[in-house]
Amino acid sequence: MGFLQILEIIVPATLVYAAPLILTALGGVFSERSGVVNIGLEGLMVVGAFSSIIFNLMFADTFGALTPWLGLLVGMAIGGVFSLIHAVATITFRADQTVSGVAINMLALGTTLFVVKLIYGKAQTDKITEPFYKGDIPLLSDIPIIGDIFFKDVYYTSILALVLAVVAWFVLFKMPFGLRLRAVGEHPMAADTMGIKVYRMRYIGVFISGLFGGLGGAVYASTIALDFSHATITGQGFIALAALVFGKWHPFGAMGAALFFGFAQSLSIIGSLLPLFQDIPNVYMLIAPYVLTILALTGFIGRADAPKALGTPYLKGKR
């Protein structure tokens, strides 16, 4: 098997598993750059996956091939609304941000499973009939070599995740909004002195994290899981959180880390096709993402500089 053939297997598979991680990690970047720790990324993915699957099952006959795209919007909306619980608790009531995030995770899983059992009488939904399908990206797939590796037989959602990473970088580092958001995460009192509304900016940061987290969960459910149960989102949000830290709270860093973890996750599917991994038992491939996550954070977390005010509630007028 030639090197290009190996890349044609690895890259599309990596993008499939990395896309939800990229999107969710980008949401974490916005929240934590504003100074609010968001351990609840897992819960946001859960509600995004749940709402997109339920929408797909209910309206597939109405909207046809458009259904999964609308499901993404529904997942984003529900994720954004759900994130406001975390925002109210941590920003308005200044609750411990880590505890609030853990509560969000527990609330999301418990609530969604209760509704699933209420609707379907069991702990799992049916399989969706209108998922995303792989395809070639027009024009880009015709580029020699690169087109075959990156733009053939891929999900459009994978390319969307990469594009949104660039958009997130532009917003955070090239627009006044991004400067204000980063300012309230570094020195909220100085930002307040300059007329920046700290509470509002932090609410927006957390809300954006909900949009991205819900989108990440919806993408995972509509491309990989294809249904919803207690095991649909199993640690994906925490891996995205690790990618956020590994990537040093930067959109491109988070994207790179998510691609790394996405590759690790894809090994359980494509490992048998690759000469280097085909003799390794599949059980080791299944645990590889979590082992690599721990190793990555062990090696890099000490070198990552978090926003200075991250995790610190802001009380106006108090030093």
Image (cartoon, helix red, strand yellow):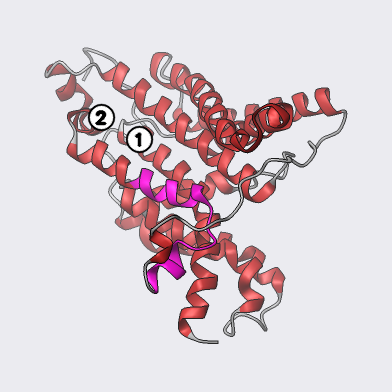
Image-based side of 178 in relation to 205, left or right = left
Instruction: Determine the residue located farthest toward the right in the rendered image.
Output: 121
Reply above or below: 17 against 275: above
Image-based side of 267 in relation to 318, left or right = right
SS at badge 2: helix
Tell me the residue at 50%/58% (across/down): 136
Tell me the residue at 45%/16% (across/down): 88
For disc 2, the neighbor class at 10 Å (few under 14, some 14 to 19, many from 20) is many
Q: Which residues are magenta?
A: 145-165
Quarter of the C terminus within the rendering: top left
For disc 1, the neighbor class at 10 Å (few under 14, some 14 to 19, many from 20) is many
Reply above or below: 256 against 125: below
Residue 121 among those drawn in magenta: no
Residue 168: quadrant of the picture: top left
What label does residue 181 carry, if any?
Answer: 2
The one nearer the camera, 180 or 36, is: 180
Percent from the top left, x then y, of residue 227?
73, 41
Reply above or below: 72 against 274: above
Res 85 seen here: yes
Reply above or below: 234 against 93: below
Q: Magenta: predominant secondary structure element?
A: helix
First in sequence, mark 1 or 2: give its number: 1
The one nearer the camera, 280 or 64, is: 64
Question: What amino acid is labelled 2 in the image?
Answer: Leu
Q: Are marks 1 and 2 in contact (CB under 8 Å)?
A: yes
Residue 147 among those drawn in magenta: yes
Question: What amino acid is labelled 1 in the image?
Answer: Phe
Determine which residue is flagged by label 1.
30
Percent from the top left, x then y, of residue 32?
36, 36
Real-space CA distance between mark 1 and mark 2, rounded to the nearest whole angstrom: 8 Å
SS at badge 1: helix
